[in-house]
Each structure stands twice: as structure tokens, then as C-alpha cells.
Image (cartoon, rainbow, N blue to C red):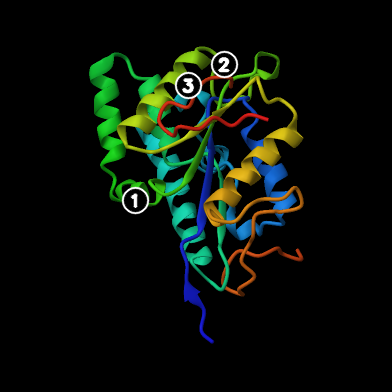
Amino acid sequence: MPDRQVSPTQVYVIGPSSTGKTTLCNAVAKSVGLSTRCYITEVARQVMRSKGYTRADVGTIEMQRAIMLAQLEKEANAFARARWGNNEGLILSDRSGIDPIVYAIMTAKGEGEARQKEDMLANIPAFQMALRRYKDAIFLLLNPVEEWLVDDGVRNLDNHERCIKVFRQVLDKFGIKYQEMGAETKRIEDRVRLLEERILLAQRPHVSQTPATRPRVSKSTSACYPDTEGHRPVTNSGREMRP
């Protein structure tokens, strides 16, 4: 029987630097046995290394555009791979195409420049296509945990609260639903469990969950299968991730 086309579950973990995004993504990917083909690791550092950008370039539209295009290309490729299978596909991404817009706004010199940069990035055709996927995706916005804040060598640590505010504004503007997690949920086990439960709700909205249940990953040969190689109400999703 030929594979049928399915709509993969997409998960994007976003937020300011040093909020535990990569730690959470790595833990979830390991827990569900997600293939590296459908796990998008942080793109920004890869782009910076390959193109010679430094932290001094974070405010340039060229750097943020390069990061966005690289991120969106990986998302599109993962989506295409996960879309064909006999079970649900799963895509997990450490950051999203929203992030470059946020940092372009954050580093702008005034509201006029911020709007100009936002428009330049938001009007990229690949981003407009991604927005269609984002409307059905799970977005988890991680809030700062004070004792976790360290210099990552890429972005400044200043204004984490403003960064969160800009993330919310951009997500709201594009009509993207999201949930938030922060200092109220510090244990990685709790974070993984809550995100896995959210994935299960997306994959099996009418099936009750049990402690032993894990999100399903497609085992189709063309999909994503295992290789052998903040305490604040959610602004627009109506749910808050809490233990």
C-alpha cells in the first residue's frame, strides 16, 4: 500500500539566549528517538561560522536574512521528509524563522528602522510560505531563568524581558499561537514531560494519555524515524505549560 500524505507535528522552541532551548530540544529528541533528519539544531551559529559573522553583526539585516533563509530551508526540507508516512511525522526545531525578525527589531535604532527591518524579513517569500505551516505548529516560548543566564558569545544578555516582549508581539502579529515556560518549571524532566504531552495532544487529540505514552514518530522509510547512526498566562493560546 503506498504511503499516504500526512501533516507532521511541528514543534518550535524559541526565546532569548540562555533559556534552555537547546537543552530541552536535545532531551526531547533523545526521549522520542527522533531522527537527525527531522531535528533542526540551532542554525545561527552555523551561519555565523560559515559566513564569518560575529556578534558585532547581529544588528545587520544581512546576517539576520542569512540566518532566516538557512533556517527556513532546513524547516522546508524536514517538513517534506516528514510529510509522507503511515503514521504521524514529527519535526522539532531549536528556534524558528521568527527569531531573526525578533533580533532585527531588538537591534534596530528606532521604531522606523525596526519596522523597515521587520518588513524586509517578513516579506521574504520563503517566510510567507513558512507562516502557513506555523499556524498549525506548536510554539514554545521559553522565559529567562535568572541563574541560567550566561554569555553565549552570540547575543548580548541585556534586555531579556524586552526580548520576551518582542517575541510575544511578533507571534501575536502573525497570528501564531504559543505557550510559555519559565522559572516555574526548571527540572528538565518536567520540561520534557510537558512538551511531550503537548505533542501528544496535537497527534492524538481524542485519545487519553498515560504516563507510559510517548509522541509517535513515523517509521516510514521516507519520514522521520530513529537513526542507527515562565509563570505567566499564555497570551494567545489559552494554555500555560506547568507541572
Looking at the picture, which amino acid does disc 2 mark? Leu
Whether residue 168 can be seen here: yes
Q: Position of residue 124 (x, y in %)?
A: 29, 45
Marks 3 and 1 close (CB-CB < 8 Å) = no
- Mark 3 lies on a secondary structure that is helix
Total numbered circles: 3
The residue tagged 1 is: 132
The local crowd at label 1, few if under 14, some if 14 to 19, many if 20 or more residues have their Cα within 10 Å, is few
- N-terminal of the two: label 3 or label 1? 1
In the shown orientation, is residue 184 left or right of residue 82?
A: right
In the displayed structure, 41 sits above or below 48; it is below
Marks 2 and 3 close (CB-CB < 8 Å) = no
Looking at the picture, which amino acid does disc 1 mark? Arg
In the shown orientation, is residue 169 left or right of residue 111?
A: right
The local crowd at label 2, few if under 14, some if 14 to 19, many if 20 or more residues have their Cα within 10 Å, is some
Q: Position of residue 67 (x, y in %)?
A: 45, 40
The residue tagged 2 is: 157
Q: Which mark is residue 164?
A: 3
Residue 104, by quadrant, is top left
In the displayed structure, 27 sits above or below 3; it is above
Q: CA distance from mark 2 to mark 3?
A: 12 Å
Whether residue 23 can be seen here: no
In the shown orientation, is residue 95 left or right of residue 30?
A: left
- Mark 1 lies on a secondary structure that is helix
- Which residue: 39% across, 51% down? 133
For marks 2 and 3, give the one nearer the viewer: 3
- Which residue: 64% across, 60% down? 216
Q: CA distance from mark 2 to mark 1?
A: 32 Å
